[in-house]
Image (cartoon, rainbow, N blue to C red):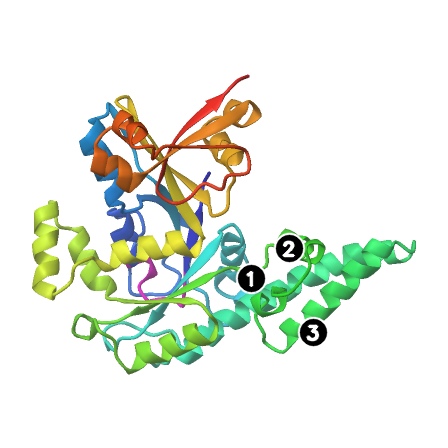
Amino acid sequence: MSFRCGIVGLPNVGKSTLFNAITSSQNAEAANYPFCTIDPNVGTVIVPDERVTGLVELFNPKKIVPATIEFVDIAGLVKGASKGEGLGNQFLSHIREVEAIIHIVRCFEDENIVHVEGKIDPKNDIETIETELILKDLDTLDKRLEKAGKGIKSGDKKAIAEVDLLNRLKDHLSVSRLAKYFTTGLNEEESEIIRDLHLLTDKPVLYVANVDDKDLNGNKFSETVKEIAKKENAEFLILSVQIESDISQLETKEEKSEFLKELGLDLSGLDKLIKKGYELLNLITFFTAGEKEVHAWTIPKNFKAPKAAGEIHTDFEKGFIRAEIIKYPDLIELRSESAVKEKGLMRVEGKDYEIEDGDVVFFRFNV
């Protein structure tokens, strides 16, 4: 299962530099002018997880497959993007294809780096992006209303209810309110209609305040972003894209650890960002582990055992019998599956069991 976070923001806020640092690559050209990025760059990165290391040390497997997440570097948006300014429509369509949005906001002053609006104003920058996303969602709604409206003429009750829902959402968006404020409290049928629209302003958001190296604990600009994130019930993170870029260029783990120590940090901003992106998508990790392979599997929270088994192979879901569950801490403490069984700590679960984060699972199935 592939999960994507789209990195968005105005031009020259550090998106491509951040993407390069995340993926430890130079696939995204970074330059001091708008529209440097035209096609979205996609990078698959490993989700930092010390539990994989623990299982590898225990089993010494022939193969290791960690959990991953995809990041998409989407070109800088500007005013008028929803109407095609700066190739805006093309960029907005790229956002529709991601499950969550990482919104990079410039929170540093540097006269050598051009700001597309001419001044540093996080609130205005965020409103610019949100306005364009709302306008694009309104365009999506108009197209859906036109299609649904045809069913009203025939007296289709379902079509009538859908048009009423869409018109209420249109009124909501028309006063510059994000779709996610509308979707709370909808019934399942209404929620399904909205989900099918893939609205840009209904996606979970992580705001990243990009500061300079002397403001890693924040500044007046990042405080503004933090307040907006709190108001929107969104996630928030402070990091210096330039520092993260410098760290990504270091070759060894020891060098990176020493660099972080000098900065007084335990974890790099990128590791925090990757973990935040994972949490933003409401994902968990379960494991299959043995001498052949240690594999971290990514699934949404609340997946039941048969569906989780289907992530490994469709036959596992079709012929699901039971799931044998060991909790990661128990396995690490007791050092073997047999020892866990002897202690009575291995659980046997059926079809209604919801896989939990950190479960080490063996699926029994019959096809």
Quadrant where the C terminus lies? top right
Is 49 a magenta residue?
Answer: no
Circle 3: is it few (<14), some (14-19), or many (20+) Cα within 10 Å? Answer: few
From this viewpoint, which residue is outermost toward the front? 343
Segment tinted magenta in the rendering: 8-17
Residue appearing at x 20%, y 75% in the figure: 215
Pinpoint residue 60: horizontal percent, then vertical percent.
20, 27
Residue 273 vertical placement versus 307 (above, below)? below
Q: Is residue 108 above or below residue 326?
A: below
Query: On the picture, is 187 further left or further right than 66?
Result: right
Name the amino acid, label 2.
Answer: Leu
Q: Is residue 362 visible?
A: yes
User: How would you rate the neighbour count of disc 1 (Cα within 10 Å): few for under 14, some for 14-19, many for 20 or more?
Assistant: many
Q: Which residue is mark 1?
A: 202
Q: Main secondary structure of the magenta part?
A: loop
Separation of marks 3 and 2 at Cα, in angstroms: 16 Å
Q: Are marks 1 and 2 in contact (CB under 8 Å)?
A: yes
Q: CA distance from mark 1 to mark 2?
A: 10 Å
Query: Could you say which disc has been placed on residue 171 in the image?
Result: 3
Label 2: element kind: helix
| Residue at 36% in and 32% down | 346
Sooner in the amino-acid sequence: mark 1 or mark 2: 2
- Residue 31 occupies quadrant: bottom left
Q: Amino acid at mark 1?
A: Asp
Where is mark 2, residue-wise? 197
Residue 56 coordinates in the image, percent (x, y) = 22, 32
- Counting residues from the start of the chain, the first of labels 3 and 1 encountered is 3
* Mark 3 residue type: Asp
Local SS, label 3: helix
